[in-house]
Amino acid sequence: MSITDALVPGLPSLLRITIAHGYIVQILLAEALFTYGLRRRSHAVMRAIFGFVVALPLMVAVPNWISGYVSGLFSLTVFLLSLMLWRWILEGSFRELLFCCVGAQLTQNLSYNVENLIYRPFADRIPDVGWFALSVGCTCVVYAFCFLLFARRPYASGHVEVEGRYVYTFAVMAALFTYVMQYLFQVYGLDRYWVSRPPLILCCLAGLCVQYGFVALKSESDERAMLERMMRQEARQYAIAQESVDLINMKAHDLKHQIARIRATGNVDDAELNDIERIVARYEDTCNSGNRDLDVVLAQKQMVCRSEGIVMTVIAQGEALTFMRPSDIASLFGNILDNAIEHERTVEPPSLRTIAVSVRRNGNMSVIRIENYCARRPRMVGGLPVTSKNDRRYHGFGMRSVRYIVERYGGSLAITTEGDLFVVSILLPYGNECVAAR
């Protein structure tokens, strides 16, 4: 007798609920965990209420009807109907949804096998209530484990970056393993033996590791490609900035001589000429570290600092960076100083807006230290400050680019706070060109 026959005698056979229908609750709960990071459609709550009211009876009736003709399709039918339900509620591509639901599918199967691994050796001594408690306990523990380890990781902006061919191929493989293997175990009676469970548990774990490991690998590859594109763009901007700074310095030098010639004529206002001289001196008084590539970046940032009322001091031994590529120098110092300038703009009162740059060689190491005033400690994740921009998918790459460059040269990066200072410290092995060329 089914569960519903005991509660509601005379219920139509299509709506009869058996213990096998517990899969409906398990798979929907797993899918809710794995799709939590996806964007919802408008009026998602109303869609969910209506969807569950319609979908739940169908998840009971349709598998019951199909089972009257073909066996082994019960769980697969429920899974396909659940996909339609979440498609109704969630926004985004079907590819993303299928990816998440396949992870939920493997998680449910993992929980089922762990439960049977514990239950089967003691089946004769565990009452139905104990079995139910064991099932609920295994579900909670396994689902929490899979959520923390897998489900919550891919989401950065409400979607998952995956390729369609990978998702569909993996979905077919997971379905063959989850449903065909389960059906064969039932047909041949292997599911009654606990020794059949450890291989299935390992397969489920391996499947989840492969699925989400691929996403992590692709995310890292995409991030590296984006960093490379940004660095190429920064190199082009650096070339333009180099020409601009050279032109400004040349014109400032010429203008200084013109002022001296005009003053010699005696027919001018000295006060006005003094003002012009001070302005020219500001542009001519650029850093002269001995490394032209570094000087260009620092000169450009000093001009920005002057316009923003930020005091920028520089003590630099340019020869400490002669082994670095010009584009890497531009990207490294440009990103750090851009972040510092962006923060200093918000500092009040303006008299506290300060940035200090230090570059020196210490033995076989090149030491870079850049600090700026920062009264409030920023939130750090993975050793890097978290961007304050709303769209974190396209922001926060500056410091990741810095870390990428430092690692290419075999160096180390430390970001700390010292009192009211935000400090970026970099150590680079002097002359480590072979690492940089990788």
Image (spheres, rainbow, N blue to C red):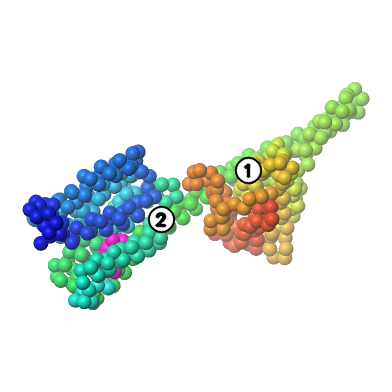
Indicate whether 313 appears above or below 124.
above
Tell me which label, 2 or 1, sits earlier in the chain: 2
From the viewer's side, name the closer residue of 9 and 413.
Answer: 9
User: Which residue is under mark 2?
Assistant: 152
Of badges 2 and 1, the one in the foreground is 2
Image quadrant for the C terminus?
bottom right
> Left or right: where does residue 348 sit relative to residue 166?
right
Residue 91 image offset from top left, x and y in percent: 34, 43
From the viewer's side, name the closer residue of 96 and 344.
Answer: 344
Task: Bin the neighbour count of mark 2 within 10 Å (Cα to Cα): few under 14, some 14-19, many 20 and up.
Answer: some
Indicate whether 76 appears above or below 201.
above
| Point 88% across, 28% down: residue | 270
From the viewer's side, name the closer residue of 4 and 384.
Answer: 4
Q: Are marks 2 and 1 in contact (CB under 8 Å)?
A: no
| Point 72% across, 36% down: residue | 248
Amino acid type of the residue that numbered disc 2 sits on in the rendered structure: Arg
Magenta residues?
A: 106-115
* Furthest-top residue in this view: 267
Q: Main secondary structure of the magenta part?
A: helix
Amino acid type of the residue that numbered disc 1 sits on in the rendered structure: Glu
Judged from the image, the secondary structure of the residue bearing numbered disc 2 is loop
Q: CA distance from mark 2 to mark 1?
A: 31 Å
Residue 18 image offset from top left, x and y in percent: 16, 59
- Inspect this view and state whether residue 323 appears: no
Judged from the image, the secondary structure of the residue bearing numbered disc 1 is helix
The label on residue 342 is 1
